[in-house]
Amino acid sequence: MSVGAEPKKIFVESQAMVRQGDARGALSFLQNAAPQLSGHVDFHMNVAIAQRALGDLPAAIKALNSALAIDPYAFMAMLSKGAILEQMGELRKAAEVYKDVLRIAPPESERPASLAPPMQRAQEVVDQQSAAMAEHFRAALGPLMKEYGGESLTRFEECMDVVAGVKRVYNAEPVQVHYPRLPAIPFFDRSYFPWFETLEAATETIQGELQTLMNEGLPGFKPYIQYAPGTPENQFKPLNHSDNWSSLWLWKDGKPQQEAMARCPKTTAILAQLPLADQPDFAPTALFSALAPHMKIPPHTGSTNTRLLVHLPLVLPGPAGFRVGNEVREWRIGEAWAFDDTIEHEAWNDADQTRVIMIFDIWNPLLSAAERSMISALLGTHRDWLAESGK
């Protein structure tokens, strides 16, 4: 129900009375108008303003609940309710209301400047209560967790943090191909990859060929991001056509890069012995990835959850890190890991020199041989369909 000129005049007058210190008069004034205005959200909002000014906080909450019964998405009523609950010392209840406030808030560019402080306070209360809840979970459930000390409870600990609100849920978000019913696992357990030991044992050999390239100024390395004109750059704008993130490809979209392979014959031979992904015209992909000092690769997701990416750190001149979903890790020279790159991930190099790792793709180990074959056929069929799109 819209508020006409007369109701608006009444609300303005009641607010003026509150500002003048006559909250009781404002409340009486509004109650006299109740029969024709009780269906308006703004009526109950103004009653709450008067009740709060009078110090009757429970009555103000009751009025705001009446406003939210009319419109459950009344943003200002919800924000006011959170603030009054906080004033009453009901921080846990306030945090739950503030969570809804943050979810439905208009974009920051569309909010009046006066809302910046209360919105910041809402976020602070939510963050504080989330941290307190996570700490409470660990204190309350710690003894029970110790009973299962021999088992990995990493997933359960992440679950506690998600329930508390200190961490968020990350799902697989493939850019190109989503394969249903594969679990979104950030880092896969090493037990899936017994050949990691072979790869890691060859670290010094690979480093030797890489060092030669670095001594020569990284010949053949080109910007990793090379968007065509007119392509949305989004978060990669600072890195588009930039040598701050560069790469040398040994295989690209399933095709051997002969010049790079000639520069790194031992590395090529080592990779050729490993179970790389084999998708004609799509995989394997294998490359050296160089990130300049004090640079960051922004959060992003990869093309398909049918594959995983393997990282092998080769040059780590100082602090550098990597995040997949909620899990943050630091690289260690010669220690490989495999992760699902369709889960949001990012990397950073805080060192004063360039960081270099090797990256290559492998099949998701949870796929059967039949599924792998059919996925390769699907990718080829999809490519051919797009190539013949003019028919």
Image: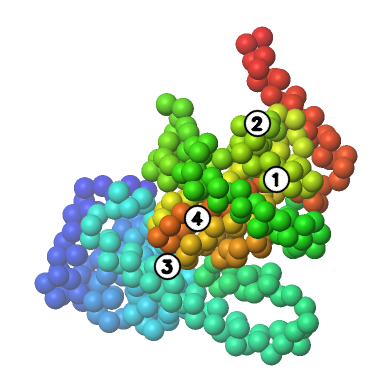
Q: Position of residue 308 (x, y in %)?
A: 70, 49
Q: Nearer the viewer, mark 1 or mark 4?
A: 1
Sequence-first disc among 2 and 3: 3
- The residue at the point 66 percent across, 85 percent down is 141
Q: Nearer the viewer, mark 1 or mark 3?
A: 1
**Which residue of the protein is positioned furthest toward the left in this rendering?**
20
In front of the other: label 2 or label 4?
2
> Residue 8: horizontal and vertical position, in percent?
22, 53
**Secondary element at tag 4:** strand
Mark pair 2, 4: CA separation: 24 Å
332 w.r.t. 288: above or below: below
Characterize the local packing of mark 1: few (<14), some (14-19) or many (20 or more) Cα atoms within 10 angstroms. some
Circle 3 crowding by C-alpha within 10 Å: few under 14, some 14–19, many from 20: many
Q: Which residue is mark 3?
A: 98
Q: Could you tell me which quadrant the C terminus lies in? A: top right
Circle 1 residue: 266
Q: Is residue 233 left or right of residue 368?
A: left
**Tag 2: residue type?**
Gln
Of the numbered discs 1 and 3, the one sitting upstream in the chain is 3
Q: Which residue does the image show at 50% across and 48% down from the upper left?
A: 214
Closer to the chain start, of discs 4 and 3, is 3
Q: Which residue is mark 4?
A: 355
Residue 288 lies, with reference to residue 241, above or below; the image says below
Residue at coordinates 62% horizontally, 11% vertically from top-left? 390
Q: Mark 3 falls on what kind of element? A: helix
Which amino acid, by three-letter code, is at mark 3?
Answer: Tyr
**From mark 2 to mark 3, how far is it between C-alphas?**
58 Å
Amino acid type at mark 4: Arg
Q: Mark 2 — residue?
A: 258
